[in-house]
Amino acid sequence: MSYKADFRIWRGDVDGGELRDFKVEVNEGEVVLDIIHRLQATQAPDLAVRWNCKAGKCGSCSAEINGRPRLLCMTRMSTFAPEEVVTVTPMRTFPVIRDLVTDVSFNYAKARQVPSFTPPADLKPGEYRMQQVDVERSQEFRKCIECFLCQNTCHVIRDFEDNKAAFSGPRFLMRIAELDMHPLDVADRQKAAQEEHGLGLCNITKCCTDVCPENIHITDNALIPMKERVADRKYDPLVWLGNKIRRRGSGD
Amino acid sequence: MSEVERHSYDVVVIGAGGAGLRAAIEARTRGLRTAVVCKSLFGKAHTVMAEGGIAASMGNVNSQDSWKVHFRDTMRGGKFLNHWRMAELHAKEAPDRVWELESWGALFDRTADGRISQRNFGGHEYPRLAHVGDRTGLELIRTLQQQIVALQQQDEREFGDPEARLKVFQECTITRLLTVPDAGSDTGNRITGAFGYWRESGRFTVFDAPAVVLATGGIGKGFKVTSNSWEYTGDGQALALLAGAPLINMEFVQFHPTGMVWPPSVKGILVTESVRGDGGVLLNSEGKRFMFDYIPDVFKEKYAKSEAEGDRWYTDQENNKRPPELLPRDEVARAINSEVKAGRGSPHGGVFLTVVGRMAGGTEEIRRKLPSMYHQFKELADVDITAEAMEVGPTCHYVMGGIAVDPDTAATPGVLGLYAAGEVAGGMHGSNRLGGNSLSDLLVFGRRAGEHAARYAEALGEERREAAPEQIDAAAAEALAPFATESAENPYTVHQELQQTMNDLVGIIRREGEMAEALTRLEELKARAAKAGVEGHRQYNPGWHLALDLRNMLLVCECVARSALERQESRGGHTRDDFPAMSPQWRRVVLACSIADPDAEHLSVTLTRSEAVPMRADLLELFERDELKKYLTDAELPGEDG
């Protein structure tokens, strides 16, 4: 079952780098991260890679495999032909630190710009009442493991560095949608989504949805409904007010 | 002294999992300047791996639940070795900690009347685990992360600086705690801060702080087959030992009964206990539900005797007893081990776990209740759990032992200003932890550690002591040693041999000769680890990071092996082939590990015995005398009329 695979891995740092060729053993059932680990243990002890859980739950080992943004731990070697060269490069949208490790601080800065969950002032812990059907939409978005592959692939920032200041990216627009759809959140999310987080820059090409390892329907369930809410409200602020009042009522 | 970057805080929390973040939130909410230092990116801690839920007796599904029932279950699960005061505080405070998460934005699954839903789990008498599908740990970590952001947003409004009072230093590894001798304490040392390096640049940094909370998690990376991530290298345990704080109960290591066994590269990855809590059953190669053959005497009255009764229990808990698939984890893990040894295992050396035909809602219900498991098996093993059985076997999951702490304050008795919470602390879970009690432990004792670290730092005021320059220089020299080594050992090779040693010789079933052999091998590995060398430079160099982690793993593994060799009985996560019975005399014995000379070139662990604190009378009264007889010595039993 074992064979020798050809890997090309980008090695370098902020000053530049290059693709390096490796020949490395592959065994049945292995994923790309196993191969990276084997390279560290046998050929390149200082090869830098982020990883934690190796089970697709933490979202640390994001990179690009043959040009496609993926988790290294969830990409099985059996998806490649034995003679195929497997090329592994760091996420392109973020500045490289070393080898496969990038500086993802952009995402933490954007996270801090989204106002946090805002419950009704008079609601005490233990008194929350919500129906399962009402929490399911936001729960889908909370499956996000923050691998930032959607941020990496979104061409609004991947191809236009200048947009980074004005655009929070799919992950954080989805976070805003999550809060907007939370049955007990009382803050106004829609104006900020449009004016401060660049929702209008998204042109729903669904690239983010395509690469999401959690299979979250980012575009269909978060971004498009958010755009609709913003549009509705532009025409009729009463729609927004009505929505909020009705939804708070159903939580009792 | 070499020039080192310095940061000054009131409280420094090491570790950014559930316990660390909860501690940091508490210290900051009390107005203290707080730093969180973590090895990974913020939000990636091992807590995200927790699947099943948070145990808290809210009584939302069965109103008969209460803290007393939770306390009893916890003590039984730990075979009465738990520090009863921790188990009491935990059971009493867990509901408030869960409700608090909801007020910070957590979205748990709901009951029909809109409250937080609770599910069944091994060893818990009633449905007790608040959950979000099978990704509860992710919900917990994200909620705490977002609460930290909320506090930072407050500070931005108030001070114009989001990091004015709470800052996360991510991808920064602490290698030594800094202490000064303290004449005022009989314990010897007082905290002055912590020394570490930035993973990204390799540069050193010092945190000056009078109070440090250790919340670094477990030790699973010392074992070959484990559900733990790379971070679980026993850092906090080793830092505490080196600073003068002892570890207790280190012989108790939990092997979770259900880890994936195939393919080899995913061996050890966790298969949540919720699979069994929601109806899944364990089968051997003959198709038999073998757990009915493994109900131990202490639990005989609590578990179903027939499959039919066990099955009825899922819908009618008043009139039926629970199925033995839901015995505490140590029992199930040993049973699986025995079946495999008897030749009744699955093709890849485990047993079968199946939910096929076990849920009324069929395929749709399986995918809704166990989405991560469905995904995990589909993606990593080509197994569709709605149509096929999973293959599972025991995997090193959790260490019950850890840093000795005061139950109320989480303070270590050894070092003034040092606190510990979560998996890194010992005592709460006794000899075996119940599923679901970990996430609640993190929150209950994380909050307590944060509170008491803050109170301590506040009371100290300006009376702070500076770190000694020579201690910083020594820490820097120690961290740079792997670059100076010639004819070096490969740190990856040493690590693999350590994992193999612990797996083979100090694993789920233990024997005297094997553990003695393990200690000999650990000595050899220590000598080799001291010569571990690295290539390249200090910038994001994983070989170097591992070479430094080896010291910690070797120290904690030595603690496990020494304690396990000493304890001549079987209890919870410590099973001796040569001493198969549980002994009431041994229940009273607490084994503590410490390091005589933390500055010695060759570090070695010494073992001391102390006596467990007797349980308070009103808590003893929560149990029937007949049950207590199974665990306690005659002298410890309450009077006949008590």
Image (tube, coloured by chain):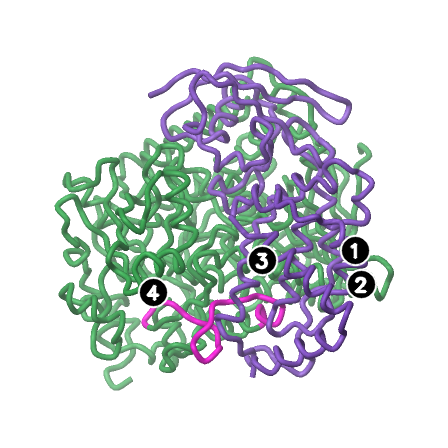
Q: Predominant secondary structure in magenta?
A: loop
Mark 4 = which residue? B80
Q: CA distance from mark 3 to mark 2?
A: 33 Å
Q: Of tags 3 and 1, which is closer to the observer?
A: 3
Within-10-Å neighbours for mark 3: few <14, some 14–19, many 20+: some
Task: Write down the residue under mark 3.
Answer: A221
The secondary element bearing badge 3 is classed as helix
Q: Given the current orientation, which residue lies at the most extreme front position?
A: A235
Q: Is residue B178 above or below residue B266?
A: below
Q: Along the horizontal axis of the image, is A102 left or right of B163?
A: left
Write down the region rendered in magenta: B100-125
Question: Which-is-in-front pick, marks 4 and 3?
Answer: 3
> Which chain does green denote in the image?
B
- At label 2, the amino acid type is Asp
Disc 1 designates what residue? B163
What residue appears at the point 36 percent right and 27 percent down from the top-left corner? A28
Q: Position of residue B513 (x, y in %)?
A: 27, 35
Q: Which chain is purple?
A: A
Distance from Cα at disc 1 to Cα at disc 4: 44 Å
Q: Residue at x 46, y 64 (%)?
A: B131
B298 in relation to B334, above or below = below
Residue B465 or residue B619, whichever sits in front: B619
Q: Are marks 3 and 2 in contact (CB under 8 Å)?
A: no
Q: Is residue B363 visible?
A: yes
Residue A78's place in the image compared with B74, above or below, is: above
Please give the name of the residue rendered at 32% of the width and 60% of the height, measured from the top-left corner: B587
| Marked residue chain, label 2 | B
Same chain? Circles 3 and 1: no
Chain letter for mark 3? A
Q: CA distance from mark 2 to mark 4?
A: 45 Å
Say what secondary structure mark 4 lies in: loop
